[in-house]
Amino acid sequence: MADLDTLRTRFARTLEAARGPAGGPDPAPYAEDLLGRWQEPQRRYHTVEHLAAVLDRVDVLEEYARDPEAVRLAAWFHDAVYLPDRSENEERSARLAERALAEAGVPDARTAEVARLVRLTVTHDPADDDPDGQVLCDADLAVLASPPSAYAAYTTAVRAEYHFVPNDAFRTGRAGILRQLLALPRLFRTPYGAERWEATARYNLTAELEMLSLPAHDPS
């Protein structure tokens, strides 16, 4: 379980750095709202553990970012709105960031950058001249390069989030997502991600796609 007090401290530090010397309201209510969202009962993968993991990976990749604090705030907001049966989660998360960060005293340009980064997680396909997008997307996709047991836990959690989807429909939809990812020229855009995560992630995605292509087991 992610340490919530540590996450509160991390958010406060990030927000204070992002808004600069002008300051603003107490960060605590904003942290509580976000942590409450990340702990909603419909979540099985997109939880505070995922949030903490993405933040940790942003720390690893920080040297490649142009605006690390914007990337960290984007990590906080990128799945802040998450309903598995909706398709506009990223857009709603970006709009939440726009409202909350403006109110919290973050300058307009940085708030806009955070929202742009959140919207980028729809495709995970940042441009070659977008280092902040590359860092956020690499941090979000790093789970794909997990060791076998952790990758299995990830896929199990994703299936649990979509428990309401019949097996055949889920297998078809998930296979489509895997093919889209595998079709990207590169899954990871930072030098660190390309070197450390690319090969393992492609192996995991290919293996999962092969499993989904096997005949479904009929429990009856």
Image: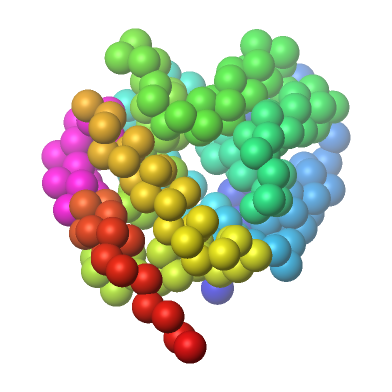
Residue, far bottom = 220
Secondary structure mostly seen in magenta is helix
- Taking the spot 76% from the left edge, 58% from the top edge, the residue there is 36
Q: Is residue 132 above or below residue 176?
A: above
Where is residue 166, by image quadrant?
A: bottom right
> Quick check: is 192 in the magenta stretch?
yes
Colouring: rainbow
- Taking the spot 42% from the left edge, 31% from the top edge, the residue there is 124
Q: Is residue 175 above or below residue 103?
A: below
- Residue 203 percent across, percent down from the top left: 17, 53
Circle count: 0
Query: In the displayed structure, does residue 190 sit left or right of residue 175?
Result: left
32 or 37, nearer to the observer: 37
Q: Is residue 40 above or below residue 153?
A: above
Q: Is residue 121 above or below residue 173?
A: above
40 or 101, nearer to the observer: 40
Query: In the displayed structure, does residue 180 sit left or right of residue 172?
Result: left
- Residue 149 percent across, percent down from the top left: 29, 74
Where is residue 91, by image quadrant?
A: top right
- Taking the spot 47% from the left edge, 49% from the top edge, the residue there is 173
State whether residue 190 appears in this view.
no
Magenta stretch in the rendered image: 186-203
- Residue 79 percent across, percent down from the top left: 62, 44
State whether residue 167 appears in this view.
yes
- Image quarter where the N terminus lies is bottom right
Query: In the displayed structure, does residue 28 sit left or right of residue 64?
Result: right
> Quick check: is 75 in the magenta stretch?
no
- Residue 195 percent across, percent down from the top left: 14, 39
- Taking the spot 68% from the left edge, 35% from the top edge, the residue there is 88
33 or 177, nearer to the observer: 177
